[in-house]
Image (cartoon, rainbow, N blue to C red):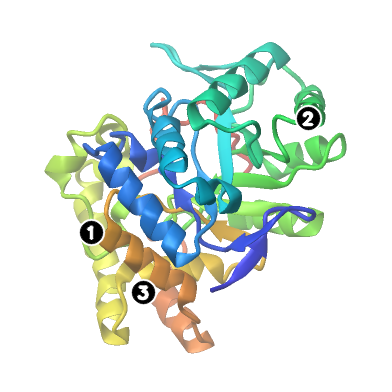
Amino acid sequence: MKARKLGEGGPEVPALGVGAMSFSDFYGPTTEENSHAVLRAAFEAGIRHIDTSNVYGMGRSEEAIGAFLREVPQAREQFVIATKAGIVPGPKRRFDNSPEHLVSELEGSLGRLGVEAVDLFYVHRRDQSIPIEEVAGTLGEIVRSGKAKAVGFSEIAPSSLRRAHAVFPVAAVQSEYSLSTRAPELGLVQTCAELGVALVAFAPVGRSLLTDHPLPLEVAQGLGFLKQNPRFMEPNYAANIAVTDRLRALAREMGEPTAALAIAWVLSRGEHVHAIPGTRSVAHFRELLRGAELELSDADLAAIEAALPVGWAHGDRYSEAQWVGPERYC
């Protein structure tokens, strides 16, 4: 399996990690038992990068991971655990990157995870009222305190990354990146490569659109995030299913799961690119794992691009409300 560094001086991990948003009910009901089954399958397969956040299920995702680490102590020695803070829950979406908030939330995460330090601590969303240089300084102090080994940002612009990295080394930037969301190619992929920063791609299978079994419309409409997401609203949803059927047909011809093609494509974008898909299913996890093992030829990549050329998706990746927080840069 491909192994890549999480930042210039960071640990070397398999290029595929586990995104633990699915350990809450974000994409549908789940249980701690299901989450542990996925973690166990990941551990046995040699996957080491586990990504979570304080707001995934309001701590539920971190608690599930912490319980697994207590059950399987050797996993703590081998897992590279990332978490995030900076989003303030409430009826009105807001963000807090102050030292007091970030340190307090990280301490809560450490308690739920049952660890003394995380391997990677992200600012989940930028608080535009605080210069990013000050936030980078805060992250540096957190590393020096021993509570995090490295730091990163989620959903920031390349220009913001350069400003932060000039103050304190940024190990990773997390961004949505897939065959359905290719904006990172307009500067973020390149800037991360130049600075030696890992680009960690979340939603690499397009929130199920790039799989053999996309979420049915009626299921998506029962989920808080997806029912407001333009790509999962009609008429966009039907159009997106019709277009992605071309990728499913190609996957059948190649004898591979569609999700495996989507993961392999993301990982082909650069040696600094990682993918952290989420799942509630061990069977689906094995399809994702196949993507990390799959070597795509130039002909394979050309066929994938022909099936899903840049700009194929119907609808924006976020609604107006969901766009509050991520930095737009193109």
Q: CA distance from mark 3 to mark 1?
A: 13 Å
Give left or right: position of 2 versus 22.
right
Q: Amino acid at mark 3?
A: Ala
Residue 293 higher or lower than 287, as above or below: below
The answer to whether mark 2 and mark 3 are in CB contact below 8 A is no
Tell me the mark number nearer the camera, choosing from 2 and 3. Answer: 2
Q: CA distance from mark 2 to mark 1?
A: 41 Å
User: Does the rendering let one see residue 299?
Assistant: yes
On residue 241, which mark appears?
1
Q: Name the element at disc 1.
A: helix
On residue 136, which mark appears?
2
User: Which residue is labeled 3 in the image?
Assistant: 307
Q: Nearer the viewer, residue 208 or 274?
A: 274
Percent across and percent down for residue 33 are: 27, 42
User: Does the rendering let one see residue 314?
Assistant: no
Percent across and percent down for residue 310 are: 47, 64
Q: Amino acid at mark 2?
A: Ala
Q: Name the element at disc 2.
A: helix
The quadrant holding residue 225 is top left
The quadrant holding residue 223 is top left
